[in-house]
Image (tube, rainbow, N blue to C red):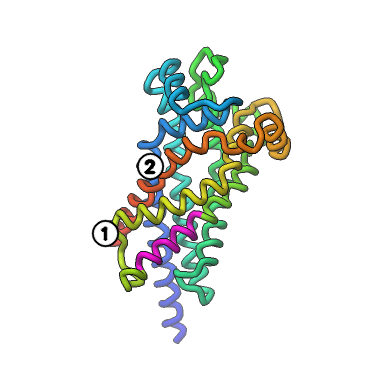
Amino acid sequence: MLYQENSDAQHLSSSLSRTHLISAASGMFSGATAAFFTAPLDTAKTRQISMKSQTSIFFVFREIVSNNGFLGLYRGLSVTLLGLLPTWSIYWSTYTSLKHIQMRHGKQDDTSFSLHLFSALGAGVVTVTLTNPLWVIKTRLQMQDASNRCKKELTIHEAISAMLREGKTGLTRGLFPSLLGVAHVCIQFPLYERAKLTFRKRKNKKNSELNSVEIICSSVLSKIVASIVAYPHEVLRIRQQMEQNSRSSISELAKQTLKEEGVLGFYRGLATNLVRVVPACSIMFVSFEYMYRFLERVV
């Protein structure tokens, strides 16, 4: 009996490790694929947030290309990729592992809303904390020449060195609003799982594989709702990460934004963000689901 229990425990541990590995690899692949196709919109959104007045996306694109050439639209992409590879690898593997752990020790199944909520929350906190310095660097690279103050293009090495010179403040800049942004995935992932379950119920098959259209519809719906609800944290995070000498708290930035720009200031760049994140989300979830299925068969 003891041998059987040990054998079952080893099998369960092996299965969890395999799932963890497959989720990590699929997350890396899907995040990198989405980032490459939507990098120009990401750069434009970051520039828009930095501006104090309403500016159209077309003006931002024209300004970037005029000052930095076409490749300026991809500024920070290398750091974005460097950040997204561990980000989505950590997130998906942690999210999947937390789901399995909860199902193993509790009575919840994969249809439970709270299961997905707490898995998304845990995975979000772990991922944001570990990868925050990478996003500080990416934001500063994208913000070069935004006000014609930079005469020389900043390299990744120089951006890292500047952040390290700031010490702990540089490494954790924007961390608090980023942690607030975990609310985004706490909304998105449970909604995504619920939408997938709805499509499966229509097929009368709990574990049936969804097609691309069903995955896209599930991801788009969940992403739009989550983006609108959680977007103000994105504005505050980017503005805090832009600062190199100031130590404005998140509450001070919020008060300043409200005073100077009103409520709409918290949603600056939202339209651009939605144009970027909706296709990015579709690309990421479709590529994740199909890569996960592929690796499940071959690993």
| Residue 239 vertical placement versus 3 (above, below) | above
Residue 208's quadrant in the figure? bottom left
> Residue at position x 44%, y 37% from top?
82
User: Is residue 53 at least partly visible in the picture?
Assistant: yes
> Residue at position x 64%, y 26% from top?
244
Residue 241's quadrant in the figure? top right
**The magenta segment:** 188-200
Report the amino acid beneath label 1.
Answer: Val
* Earlier sequence position, callout 1 versus callout 2: 2
Is-magenta flag for residue 2? no
Locate residue 38, reporting x and y percent.
39, 36
* Neighbours of disc 1 within 10 Å: few (<14), some (14-19), many (20+): few
| Residue 183 vertical placement versus 61 (above, below) | below
Residue annotated with mark 1 = 298
Residue annotated with mark 2 = 34
Report the amino acid beneath label 2.
Answer: Ala
Instruction: Please indicate whether residue 261 sits to the left or right of residue 219 in the image.
Output: right
